[in-house]
Image (tube, rainbow, N blue to C red):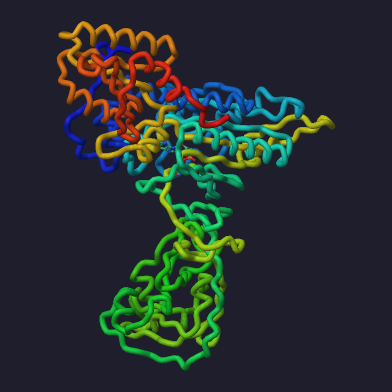
Amino acid sequence: MKASQFTISTLKETPSDAEIASHQLLIKAGFIRKLASGIYSWMPMGLRVLRKIEHIVREEMNRSGAQEILMPVTQPGELWEESGRWQLYDEGLLLKFKDRHDRDFCFGPTHEEVVTDIARMELKSHKQLPVNFYQIQTKFRDETRPRFGVLRAREFIMKDAYSFHNTLDCLQSTFEQMHETYSRILTQMNLEFRAVDADSGSIGGSGSIEFHVLADSGEDLIAFSSDGTYAANIELAEAVAPETSESPLLPIKKVETPHQKTIADVVEYLQLPIESTIKTLLVEGSDTSLVALVVRGDHTLNPLKVEKLSTVRQPLTLASEADILAATGCTPGSIGPTTLDFPIIVDRAANALRNFTCGANENDYHLCNVNWSRDTPEFTVEDIRNVESGDLAPNASGTIEIRRGIEVGHIFQLGNKYSAPMKATVLDAEGKAQTMVMGCYGIGVSRLVGAAIEQYHDDRGIRWPTSIAPFQVVLIPINATKSEQVHKTAHQLYQQLLDAGIEVLLDDRDQMRPGVKFAEAELIGYPHRIVIGDRSLTNGEVEYVNRHTLENQAWPVAEVVAKLKSAVLGSPAVD
Ligand code: ATP
Ligand code: MG
């Protein structure tokens, strides 16, 4: 490709509404253009990257034995009524509309309903299973806060696959195969990632694993054990119980804490270690009007863990100040578990404390040296907090370390969540109808473009891994209009590189200064750059610059093709 015939639309300024590097760089380097909030066009340079990722994903899915299909983005509401998700799918994410006959439709945010409808029509016998259908398709989710460019868009591209099985064992084996396939895809893209245990969210089902690209800008927190055997999204990561304190029980003591509202205030005022205090939060209950949730003063509540408890009303709703006052006679800052007459759920770490401090259920007072059972009504112990770095990891696997990640893929064991309500059955060996067992597997193709940039950029711009770069090599001739030799060498190298199967951009725009071209090349992030100028050509050489190391070398013209071939087409990331 010649730059003179290719629309390169870089900007001088960093867009002010873009908060993180990938969003800023995708706009600044002219890869995407915004049409509306969370809705982007892919410009020629950006589309090349997107297609590269699609290609890697498609090859690996095909290698796994999955079959590509393409389902419509427009989906009839009736199918969603059948699965029970027309009203329930993550509040507001579903973009609904009507056709001219007043029939309900939505723009597909995911395709479980459509694929299950296909499966129930096309798959008749147990002998046809297992089957794994996939597509690479546009999705729409009316996200509450579209942000970070392509990382959280409203319209985006996903590879989604859906498998159908006779037995759970068979599902398990496809699930493991998809785990392996996703690892291969991300390895081919040269990304640093982790597979972590995850919550299944509104897609539902039992087991699920998320794939996270590690990046400080990630929205998710992931917890690993120091021995590397445990990894889970913090939403799900188990907080194990610390050993119960052995200190002797001290007599309870009531202390005055005037105007001390937060736990930080109380700790400062009473000069206590925060780990010896507890916080009591009141939420609405399912059978009782209120439920008390207790965590250690330095810990935070994990709402997803709490929502799974049957005593707590869903969605999790904090009690109003008026309800708290009516039930306890005090304001939220002075509550403690000692005299409450509704269910009390205590986190494992809070339960391990002795002689702790808590609110006295009386404004401006706290109690010190409180002890479970001796000073409190009955309670239950659950894991309801977020893990923290340094905590003990589950299964004696060391201590917890926490990093940020961008969720780029998610694989689920759905079981019969969709196949049962939608009556997707096949005939078993005895000729009886049996409900198919399903799995589903998503990878965010457009999100991966942004995630890769989050890992690969510096203050000059993007540093594409060669496997997904828009062009592998850029050739920049200097003063080609004046120097016949430069012009000729550049065009010869260009042709030789094309012949060698290397994706090369010849920057033949003659109106641009070399310095501007270099800065632009660094912004766009081609991994390999060759500069052809009269001065080095007198020695029969050109200048090579590596975008990752910014290293600069003189290469003999005659060796350029061979050297680039080995740099670009060298050993594959995955065999
Ligand atoms: P998130 O938790 O980030 O909202 P999700 O768990 O709702 O994502 P899934 O339903 O698991 O997403 O979708 C599969 C994949 O699709 C995700 O792992 C992600 O890579 C991609 N994806 C989901 N939502 C978006 C979005 N708004 N923009 C871009 N990609 C997305
Ligand atoms: Mg997910």
The residue positioned 30% from the left and 21% from the top of the image is: 530
Instruction: Please name whichever residue, 83 or 377, is drawn nearer the observer in this view of the structure.
Output: 377
Q: Where is residue 95 in the image (x, y as percent from the top left)?
A: 40, 34
Q: Quadrant of residue 243?
A: bottom right
Left/right placement of residue 443 relative to residue 529 reads: right
The residue positioned 41% from the left and 21% from the top of the image is: 563
The residue positioned 51% from the left and 47% from the top of the image is: 201
Instruction: Please name whichever residue, 201 or 287, is drawn nearer the observer in this view of the structure.
Output: 201
Instruction: Please name whichever residue, 503 or 321, is drawn nearer the observer in this view of the structure.
Output: 503
Q: In which quarter of the image is the N terminus?
A: top left
Q: Is residue 543 above or below residue 272?
A: above
Q: Where is residue 324 in the image (x, y as percent from the top left)?
A: 38, 73
Which quadrant contains ligand 1?
Answer: top left
Q: Where is residue 295 in the image (x, y as percent from the top left)?
A: 45, 71
Q: Where is residue 287 in the image (x, y as percent from the top left)?
A: 53, 66
Left/right placement of residue 440 relative to residue 550 reads: right
Q: In this view, does 574 lie above or below 335?
A: above
